[in-house]
Image (cartoon, rainbow, N blue to C red):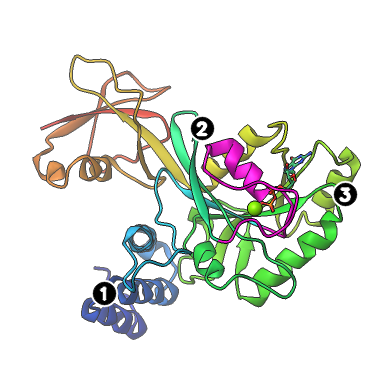
Amino acid sequence: MPANLTPDYDRADAKYRAATDDEARLLALREMFSVIPKHKGTEKLQADLKQRISLLRKTIARAPAKSGPDPFYIPRSGAGQVVFVGPPNVGKSLLVGRTTHAPVKVADYPFTTALPVPGMAHWEDIQLELVDTPPVTADHIPPGLMGTIRSSDILALVVDASTDPLEQTDLLLTLMAQRELILHSVPRAQLDPSTPHEHTAILVANKADLAPAEAIDTLRDLYADKIELLAVSAETGTGIDRMLARCWQLLSSIRVYTKEPGQPPDMKKPFVLESTSTVDDLAREIHRELPDKMRFAKLWRDGIPPGQQVHRTESLRDKDVVEIHE
Ligand SMILES: Nc1nc2c(ncn2[C@@H]2O[C@H](COP(=O)(O)OP(=O)(O)O)[C@@H](O)[C@H]2O)c(=O)[nH]1
Ligand SMILES: [Mg+2]
């Protein structure tokens, strides 16, 4: 423990120790991060806090709801959760339905979807959970929807690129700002861990098949400093793969494959970990007691000698292959 921590930090730390549930623990961890002196000497501790906040947030999002079933609460599964939110008729349901085969209702009359509906999208060798939601309008956000949004990993605001997309975008950004959600089109690891208000978000301009390319370019340019635009067509499938690839990047996760000595790696089911994970974190994900039993690990990665022996503190990267020796 570095000696140069402040009384504020100690107080937050005491709150953390005294906390009796995960919500209180998360609040205390965020406070610890916000008051920790930001200098070289605390870098390791800052990184550690960041990771604990991220893991705890996920644990809370995975836990079953305490107060009985809440239909707006969608437990997270797969590598990450993307929630699609927008006005009526922009194609949210078709987007999620076509990409995941979830049982959504698509219709050319508004307000078909009353509750969030999740589905799993396959992208490369991972699964992303996409969630269709009921529509929002200037005077109505379904009660509970902000909870769905806040507990997601990524918010995808959806507009119809062929019908007044500027007005729709303005409306959505205003609604989120009014509810104190600060949107950034950056990977989750770059959000400020001391606040729950920041959220990773993208703008999905759907029905690109019906809209002139210039209209989409104008929209992109106009909002360039606010939110990143991805043009797609749920109808033709154009842009969907790029959208999923970008979502994977924004999750700040890595895929790691494991292998048994003398066997080829299991390339079918990667472990999905935080981007800051080490060999130790991988071992813990495989089995709770594995870090204690592990003697050493071998690593396969482009650019280094194959099967190089590495320490348990070695940082992992996307697509690493690891062999753990007990
Ligand atoms: N041409 C075209 N039509 C679309 C596209 N996405 C959705 N639609 C149509 O737009 C209407 C509304 O779609 P829906 O998914 O129900 O919108 P939601 O209310 O946002 O869920 C339906 O008739 C869809 O077939 C698209 O990318 N291109
Ligand atoms: Mg719908």
> Mark 1, residues whose alpha carbon is within 10 Å: few (<14), some, or many (≥20)?
few
Q: Is residue 245 visible?
A: no
User: Quarter of the image containing the N terminus?
Assistant: bottom left
> Mark 2, residues whose alpha carbon is within 10 Å: few (<14), some, or many (≥20)?
some
Which numbered disc, 2 or 1, marks the residue that appears first in the sequence? 1
192 lies left or right of 186: left
Q: Which residues are magenta?
A: 86-114
Q: Residue 21 shows which numbered tag?
A: 1
Front residue of 318 and 5: 318
> Mark 3, residues whose alpha carbon is within 10 Å: few (<14), some, or many (≥20)?
few
Q: Which residue is mark 3?
A: 218
Say what secondary structure mark 3 lies in: helix
Asked if residue 91 lies in the magenta stretch, the reply is yes
Q: CA distance from mark 2 to mark 1?
A: 35 Å
Kind of residue at badge 2 = Trp
Kind of residue at badge 3 = Thr
Q: Residue 123 shows which numbered tag?
A: 2
Say what secondary structure mark 2 lies in: strand
Kind of residue at badge 1 = Asp
Which numbered disc, 3 or 1, marks the residue that appears first in the sequence? 1
